[in-house]
Image: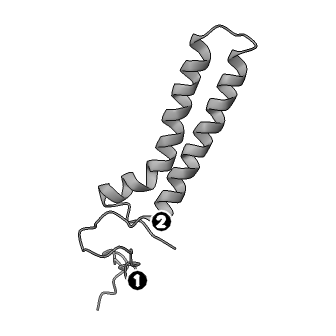
Amino acid sequence: MRFYDLAIPSQLTAALLPDLTLIVGAMILLLVAVWRRESAAHQPTVGVLSIGLAVVTLGTVLSMMVRPLPPSRSGSTTMTAPALRPPRRTCSSSSRRRE
């Protein structure tokens, strides 16, 4: 499984590419559906375009699975989990013992 480091702008954009494809395509499809008059011939056209948008989005997802990740700052293509550190304990002045 591939992991994206979302702190790197190129990998964040790559992770959002299928979503952006679907959203922009849906907006264009909405404009196509609204600008033409409603008719018996127009409805199947909008339906075919909807299926085409779904296929294009699926192709985007599949291509993201096959192609390598954009280069990261460290040069590796996988993200490693950061080391977990215990939280710092802070002592307030009232909780300290006075001797």
Residue 70 image offset from top left, x and y in percent: 32, 63
Q: Which residue position is annotated with label 1?
A: 86
Q: Is residue 73 above or below residue 27?
A: below
Query: Which residue is painted at 66% across and 37% down in the image?
Result: 51
Q: Please give the count of numbered marks on the rendered protein.
A: 2
Q: Secondary structure at mark 1?
A: loop
Q: Secondary structure at mark 2?
A: helix
Query: Which residue is painted at 60% across and 37% down in the image?
Result: 52
Would you call the spot at circle 2 few (<14 residues within 10 Å), some (14-19), or many (20 or more)?
Answer: few
Outermost residue on the top side: it is 37
Tell me how far mark 1 sits from mark 2, CA to CA. 38 Å
Q: Is residue 71 left or right of residue 45?
A: left
Q: Is residue 74 above or below residue 29?
A: below
In the picture, the quarter occupied by the C terminus is bottom left
Query: What amino acid is labelled 1 in the image?
Result: Pro
Q: Is residue 18 left or right of residue 41?
A: left
Query: Which residue is painted at 35% across and 79% down in the image?
Result: 88
Residue 54 is tagged as none
Q: Which residue position is annotated with label 2?
A: 66
Q: Is residue 11 left or right of residue 32?
A: left
Pointer 1 with pointer 2, Cβ within 8 A: no
Query: What amino acid is labelled 2 in the image?
Result: Val
Residue 73 position by quadrant? bottom left
